[in-house]
Amino acid sequence: QVQLVESGGGAVHPGGSLRLSCAASGLTFNSYAMAWFRQAPGKEREFVAGFGWGGKTTEYTDFAKGRFTISTSSAQNSVYLEMNSLKPEDTAVYYCAAERTRGPLSKHERTYDCWGQGTQVTVSS
């Protein structure tokens, strides 16, 4: 059974940084695409960044490029999201997601099979 557990959220001032972690069990990155999504109050869940299966491809949404970095650790079976230069509009619940696939990385939440419980990120002065 696949399980994803996020951690690392919190409250920071604008310009601050956070590192989110997603501990994965029951899967290997060779058979799963991994992604981070976020959902702000009153808005739909949106793709932030992701790794294709086997780590062969990496994609970021426009607002994440240059500020966020996704990485993995096979030894820890974990996925990370390093977030820098945080803005108030980055305030959201951040979710880790996994899709069993050997196909292209998807940016659509409905294609993902498993989700973590989410971790809150709040950016305010």
Image (cartoon, helix red, strand yellow):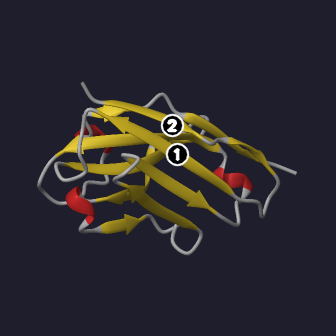
Task: Point out residue 44 in the picture as x, y percentages from the top left corner.
Answer: 47, 40
Between the residue at mark 2 and the residue at mark 1, the CA separation in whole angstroms equals 5 Å
Question: Furthest-top residue in view?
Answer: 1
Q: Where does label 1 land, which residue?
A: 21
Residue 93 or residue 41, whichever sits in front? 93
Q: Which amino acid does label 1 sit on?
A: Ser
Q: Residue 80: x percent and y percent?
A: 49, 53
Secondary-structure class at tag 2: strand
Tag on residue 6? 2
Q: Nearer the viewer, residue 74 or 107?
A: 74
Q: How many labels does the image show?
A: 2
Q: In this view, does 55 lie to the left or right of 65?
A: left
Circle 1 crowding by C-alpha within 10 Å: few under 14, some 14–19, many from 20? many
Does residue 32 appear in the picture of this structure?
yes
Check disc 1 and report its element: helix, strand or loop.
strand
Label 2 crowding class (10 Å Cα cut-off): few <14, some 14-19, many 20+? many
Is residue 85 shown left or right of residue 67? right
Disc on res. 43: none
Does label 2 or label 1 sit earlier along the sequence? Answer: 2
Residue furthest toward the right?
Answer: 125
- Give amino acid for label 2: Glu
Front residue of 112 and 17: 17
Horizontal and vertical percent for residue 2?
Answer: 28, 29
Residue at 43%, 32% in the rendered image: 116
Which residue corresponds to the image point at 51% horizontal and 72% vertical from the top-left? 65
Tell me whether circle 2 and circle 1 mark residues in contact (CB < 8 Å). yes
Residue located at (82% from left, 54% from top): 13
